[in-house]
Amino acid sequence: MTMNLDHDELHRLLATLAESDIKEFRLEGEDFYLEVKRNLETSSDSIISQKNPIPEEIDSPPSQRKIEASPVPSTPPPSVPGSRSDLLEVTAPMVGTFYRAPGPEEPPFVEIGSRISVGQAVCILEAMKLMNELESEVSGEVMEILVENGTPVEFGQVLMRLKPV
């Protein structure tokens, strides 16, 4: 029996896995190998959430493709000088490209000084051609935006800092 997965079927499979409590999943076909691993433990330190959780990295050639969701970073994220203890840090929940606006011709989600509320989109992280809006889990005021638009970011990297209100 030959097994082929197109992009839509892969996306549906990953979305189904994301909604389940399955920690590890393997699927092998004639010309591919898919492995999804994730850590379901959540941290109360995180102040953002993803609307559409997706895998974080694809490494190796298509014939031996391995997808890992929520990997532990092999190197610590870049440090950001001048961290203030009165501010909450918004960190990247995945490897991806940081975007401040929903589109090139559209205004940014937030600016320094913007007041945000719980559930409000603060940026987009693009990973594997999928756009993931990051939503705030706290109300506050944006004090610092530490990443330039269109810049690659690492898992756990500080994107912005908020003053809670």
Image (spheres, rainbow, N blue to C red):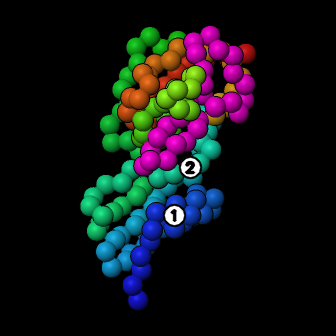
- Identify the residue position indicated by label 1 in the image: 8
Q: Nearer the viewer, residue 118 or 24?
A: 118
Task: Write down the region rendered in magenta.
Answer: 109-134
Residue visible at 44% across and 71% down in the picture: 5
Residue visible at 44% across and 10% down in the picture: 82
Residue visible at 42% across and 39% down in the picture: 96
Percent of width and height locating residue 55: 47, 52
Q: Nearer the viewer, residue 139 or 62?
A: 62
Residue 131 magenta-highlighted: yes
Count the marks: how many? Answer: 2
Amino acid type at mark 1: Asp
Residue 118 magenta-highlighted: yes
Figure quadrant of residue 32: bottom left
Q: Is residue 13 above or below residue 56?
A: below
Q: What distance separates the C-alpha of mark 2 from that of mark 1?
A: 15 Å
Residue visible at 31% across and 54% down in the picture: 59
Percent of width and height locating residue 147: 44, 22
Q: Are marks 2 and 1 in contact (CB under 8 Å)?
A: no
On residue 53, which mark appears?
Answer: 2
Percent of width and height locating residue 141: 66, 15
Which of pointers 2 and 1 indicates the residue nearer the eye? 1
